[in-house]
């Protein structure tokens, strides 16, 4: 009788653990999930959410003379979507290029999200822009 109770108890515990395991919080500590700064100066900062997106951006600079952000990408960017801090789309810019220039005059002080849409399998790369 005790063998049957032990079997039932073990089965119950295994079932309970398998049910609760996906619910338990997990911490993902991977180097690919670190925010990476692409451009930073006294006027603005551009970051990407993950190191895994870094190969897409072959160049990211701020040209002080022209007052523009310049991005070079490893793949052709079809369009760029710019969202404000509230998630409202401010701009939808057709690009069709691997070199993108955006004037600082497009942005007032605040936080923005810039989404680079790549042709093909509907991939996108997102960056954060903070204008001081």
Image: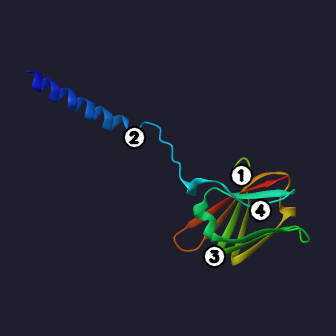
Residue shown at the point (7%, 21%) measured from the top left = 1
Report the side of 3 relative to 21 (left or right): left
Of circles 4 and 2, which is in front? 4
Asked if the residues shown at circle 4 and circle 3 are in contact, with their CB atoms under 8 angstroms apart, the answer is no
Q: Which residue is mark 1?
A: 88
**Residue 115 as seen in the image, left or right of residue 122:** right
Residue indicated by mark 3: 74
Contact between labelled residues 2 and 1, with CB atoms less than 8 Å apart = no
Q: Earlier in the sequence, mark 4 or mark 2?
A: 2
| First-in-chain label (4 vs 3) | 4
The location of residue 102, given as percent across then percent down, is: 80, 68
Q: Nearer the viewer, residue 63 or 102?
A: 63
Compare marks 1 and 2 and give the one earlier in the sequence: 2
N-terminal-most mark, 4 or 1: 4
Judge whether 73 appears above or below 51 on screen: below
Could you give the CA–CA distance between mark 1 and mark 2, rounded to whole angstroms?
Answer: 34 Å
Q: Which residue is mark 2?
A: 22
Q: For mark 4, what is the residue?
A: 39
Which-is-in-front pick, marks 1 and 2?
2
Asked whether the beta carbons under mark 4 and mark 1 sit within 8 Å of each other, the answer is no
Asked whether 49 or 28 is in front, the reply is 28
- Position of 69 with respect to 121 (left or right) is right
For the residues labelled 4 and 3, the Cα–Cα distance comes to 17 Å
Q: Nearer the viewer, mark 4 or mark 3?
A: 4
Label 4 neighbour load within 10 Å: few <14, some 14-19, many 20+: some
* Vertical placement of residue 107 versus 7, above or below: below
The tally of labels here is: 4
Question: Could you tell me how far apart the alpha carbons at marks 1 and 3 are, in whole angstroms?
Answer: 28 Å
């Amino acid at each position: 009788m005790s063998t049957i109770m032990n079997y039932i108890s073990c089965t119950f515990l295994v079932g309970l653990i398998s049910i609760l395991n996906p619910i338990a919080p997990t911490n993902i500590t991977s180097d690919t999930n670190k925010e990476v700064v692409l451009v930073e100066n006294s006027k603005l900062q551009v970051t990407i959410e993950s190191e895994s997106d870094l190969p897409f951006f072959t160049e990211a600079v701020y040209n002080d003379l022209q007052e523009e952000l310049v991005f070079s990408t490893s793949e052709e960017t079809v369009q760029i979507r710019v969202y404000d801090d509230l998630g409202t789309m401010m701009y939808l810019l057709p690009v069709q290029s691997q070199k993108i220039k955006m004037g600082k005059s497009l942005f007032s002080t605040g936080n923005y999200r810039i989404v680079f849409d790549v042709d093909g399998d509907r991939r996108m790369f997102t960056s954060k822009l903070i204008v001081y």
